């Protein structure tokens, strides 16, 4: 029995070690982003193009577009005014986000004079009812492209969700179901995705985050590692 018991403990120990190694392997931090092209280009001004909408929600584009200037400006960049960009594009016959993002970089540089263009896509925007909870989430991805050369300087993605702060552990199953229904009704009568879009924009475009944008020349942190 002692031999069997010891053998069992060895198996358990080995299994625990294997699980520990597996967890450590899954928790491996992402590789540092290669900023060599970004640092060489040194963009000072950014043109934010209208985001491409990959969702069925019509409010996704104006909601996201309206909240991207602030984090970029706070990161030390001059950002072309959103209203000016929109009016200029429409005056030149560009009516959709897809058309705007297909304009050659040299032409964008000629029209707006910006150093870099920010190309954004909305992957998720809106609320989803999931039986015991209702989640409002926004997911964005972006690329920063040098308008002088067409070179990719940076790319990344970010999300924000109401589920991050949700607490469904109280009230039992009935309470959870009622709360989910109420949340879904409120979400369909008010734009709960708008603040989530703001949070996702901050996470995506606020400089100084791991593998995020670098600080621009208007920031006191410009050039710091």
Image (spheres, helix red, strand yellow):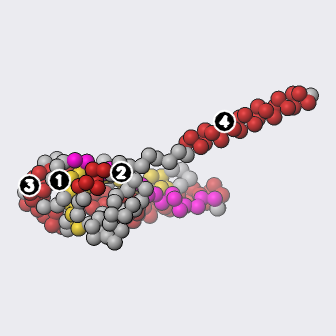
The residue shown at (17%, 49%) is 149
Left or right of 9, for residue 143: left
- Mark 3 vs mark 1, CA separation in Å: 20 Å
Disc 1 to disc 4: CB gap under 8 Å: no
- The picture places residue 108, in percent across and down from the top left corner, at 13, 55
- Residue 18 numbered mark, or none: 4
Give the number of callouts.
Answer: 4
As helix, strand or loop, the secondary structure at mark 1 comes to loop
Instruction: Tell me which label, 4 or 2, sits earlier in the chain.
Output: 4
The quadrant of the image that shows the N terminus is: top right
Residue labelled with disc 2: 156
Instruction: Tell me which label, 4 or 3, sits earlier in the chain.
Output: 4
Instruction: Tell me which label, 1 or 2, sits earlier in the chain.
Output: 1
- Residue farthest to the right, as pictured: 1
- Quadrant of the rendered structure where residue 21 is? top right
Left or right of 110, for residue 24: right
As helix, strand or loop, the secondary structure at mark 4 comes to helix
The residue shown at (82%, 29%) is 7
Residue labelled with disc 1: 147
Residue numbers of the magenta segment: 151-169
Instruction: Tell me which label, 3 or 2, sits earlier in the chain.
Output: 3
- Mark 1 vs mark 2, CA separation in Å: 18 Å
Left or right of 178, for residue 121: left
- Residue 51 numbered mark, or none: none
- Residue 93 numbered mark, or none: 3
Disc 4 to disc 3: CB gap under 8 Å: no
The residue shown at (27%, 61%) is 65
Nearer to the camera, 32 or 158 = 32
As helix, strand or loop, the secondary structure at mark 3 comes to loop
- The picture places residue 11, in percent across and down from the top left corner, at 76, 31
Location of residue 4 with respect to 117 vertically, above or below = above
- The picture places residue 200, in percent across and down from the top left corner, at 39, 59
């Amino acid at each position: 029995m002692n031999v069997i018991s010891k053998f069992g403990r060895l198996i358990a120990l080995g299994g625990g070690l294997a699980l520990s190694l597996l967890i450590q392997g899954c928790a491996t931090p992402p590789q540092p982003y290669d900023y060599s092209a970004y640092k060489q280009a040194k963009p000072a001004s950014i043109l934010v193009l209208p985001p491409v909408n990959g969702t069925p929600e019509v409010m996704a584009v104006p909601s996201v577009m309206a909240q991207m200037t602030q984090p970029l400006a706070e990161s030390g960049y001059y950002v072309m005014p959103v209203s000016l960009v929109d009016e200029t594009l429409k005056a030149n016959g560009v009516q959709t986000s897809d058309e705007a993002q297909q304009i050659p970089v040299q032409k964008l540089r000629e029209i707006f004079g910006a150093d870099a263009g920010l190309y954004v896509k909305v992957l998720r925007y809106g609320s989803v009812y999931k039986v015991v909870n209702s989640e409002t989430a926004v997911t964005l991805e972006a690329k920063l492209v040098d308008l002088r050369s067409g070179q990719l300087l940076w790319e990344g993605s970010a999300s924000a969700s109401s589920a991050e702060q949700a607490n469904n552990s109280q009230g039992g199953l009935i309470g959870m179901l009622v709360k989910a229904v109420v949340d879904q009704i409120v979400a369909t009568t008010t734009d709960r995705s708008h603040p989530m879009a703001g949070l996702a924009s901050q996470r995506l475009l606020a400089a100084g985050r791991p593998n995020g944008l670098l600080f621009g020349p208007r920031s006191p942190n410009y050039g710091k590692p």
